[in-house]
Amino acid sequence: MTLTLTSSVFHHQGDIPRRYTCDGEDISPPLSWSGVPAGAKSLVLIVDDPDAPDPKAPKMTWVHWVLYNIPPGTTGFTESVAAKDLPAGTLEGINDWKRTGYGGPCPPVGRHRYFHKLFALDTVLPNLDRPTKVKLEKAMQGHVLAQAELIGGYKRAR
């Protein structure tokens, strides 16, 4: 079985509804997954935007959400999942707003792509004390059993 990641509110390569952006309620979208490998000990979720600040001339990848040590039996998150509602053991990293939690799409110009990436790991990571995406990815090296990706797009109305 292949690791898959989906959302009930947008399809792969489709548009993320305004509700989940800075122009709406800025809440996390519902996410579901299946196909977690039998040997997985934890899951990691990273949401980022490689098109920042301008898709015609990207200069950086903006990080929107970082979660790790998600229990492997977890099958998704409800809409607007709060830190207190995350499964026991789940730890948060910091996004590029220098805070934990979800920060929705808020592109300054053009239509950006938002990569929702789920990783199944063969280990439970140590507490990395609110890691950045870079620090988390370094800790994950050599431990990824499977990966799934869901890409949504968003362009602000002007």
Image (tube, rainbow, N blue to C red):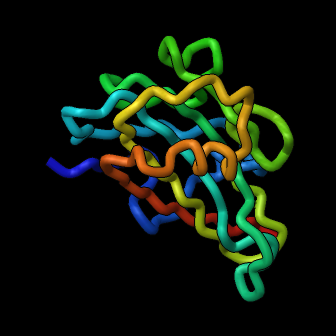
Name the residue at 45% across, 54% down: 10
Q: Residue furthest bottom?
A: 56
Q: Which residue lies furthest to the left in this view?
A: 1
Taking 158 as reference, is 128 above or below it?
Answer: above
Location of residue 115 (image quadrant): bottom right
Residue 21, image x, y percentages: 70, 49
Q: Residue furthest front?
A: 142
Location of residue 95 (image quadrant): top right
Name the residue at 52% across, 15% down: 89
Observer-nearest residue: 158 or 110? 110
Quarter of the image where the C terminus is located: bottom right
Residue 73, image x, y percentages: 30, 23
Name the residue at 29% across, 49% down: 4
Is residue 15 in sight in this rendering? Answer: yes
Is residue 25 in sight in this rendering? Answer: no
Instruction: Indicate left or right for 26 with 140 as reference.
Output: right
Name the residue at 23% across, 33% down: 39
Instruction: Indicate left or right for 3 with 23 as reference.
Output: left
Taking 158 as reference, is 70 above or below it?
Answer: above
Residue 129, image x, y percentages: 73, 26
Instruction: Indicate left or right for 17 with 97 as reference.
Output: left
Residue 104, image x, y percentages: 70, 47
Taking 42 as reference, is 26 above or below it?
Answer: below
The image shows a total of numbered marks equal to: 0
